[in-house]
Amino acid sequence: QVQLVESGGRLVQAGGSLRLSCAASGRTFSSYAMGWFRQAPRKEREFVGRIRWDSSTFYADSAKGRFTISRDNAKNTVFLQMNSLKPEDTAVYYCAADIKRYNANYARPDAYNYWGQGTQVTVSS
C-alpha cells in the first residue's frame, strides 16, 4: 500500500510560481513512476506530467516549458514546479503512483495505482 500526500497549493497571481510536493510512503518509491494530474470544476481529470523511475519526464502540451517535475528518492518526494501560471491552471492537483516501470498509457488516470487527496491551486488574473 502506498500513501500519497500533496502539499503546496495556494492562491497565486497570474505569472507567479508554485512548487507542489507529494510525499509518499513505502520503501519502493524509487521504482515507481509518479504522475501529476489536475481537475478543474466540471472538467475531467487531466494529465500534467510524469516522472519515471529513471527521472525521465513527460509533459502535457499545456505544461511544456512552464512546469517541471522532479523527484528526491531519498525523501520519497516528487515535486511539480509551476512557473508562469495562468488562470486556466486553476484546479485541484493530484499526484499518483504507477507501479509499472513502463506504461504506454501514462496520460490516463486509470494507469495509476495510488492517488493522493489533492491540493488546490488557484491562479487569479
Image: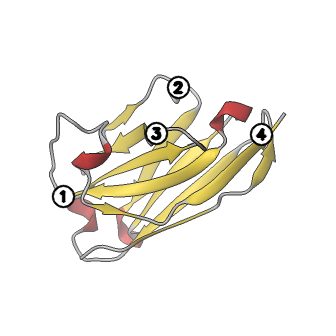
Residue 72, position in %: x, y? 41, 61
Query: For the residues carrying marks 3 and 1, which lies nearer the camera in this image?
Result: 3
Residue 8 drawn at (x, y percent): 64, 61
The residue indicated by pointer 1 is: 99
- Seen in the picture, residue 66 relative to 4 is either above or below; the reply is above
- Pointer 3 and pointer 1: residues touching (CB < 8 Å)? no
* Disc 3 + disc 4, Cβ < 8 Å: no
Q: CA distance from mark 3 to mark 4?
A: 25 Å
Residue 64, compared with residue 120, is above or below; it is: above
Instruction: Name the image quarter holding the N terminus.
Output: bottom left
Q: Position of residue 124 (x, y in %)?
A: 82, 40
Q: Could you tell me if residue 30 is visible in this image?
A: yes
Residue tagged 2: 62
Instruction: Label 4, secondary structure: give it.
Output: loop
Which amino acid does the dot numbered 2 rest on? Ser
**Would you name the residue on which mark 4 appears?**
16
Mark 4, residues whose alpha carbon is within 10 Å: few (<14), some, or many (≥20)? some
Residue at 58% across, 52% down: 92
Q: CA distance from mark 2 to mark 1?
A: 25 Å
Secondary structure under tag 1 reads: loop
The amino acid marked with disc number 1 is Ile
Q: What element does badge 3 sit on?
A: loop
Q: What whole-number distance in Å separates the C-alpha atoms at marks 2 and 4? A: 16 Å
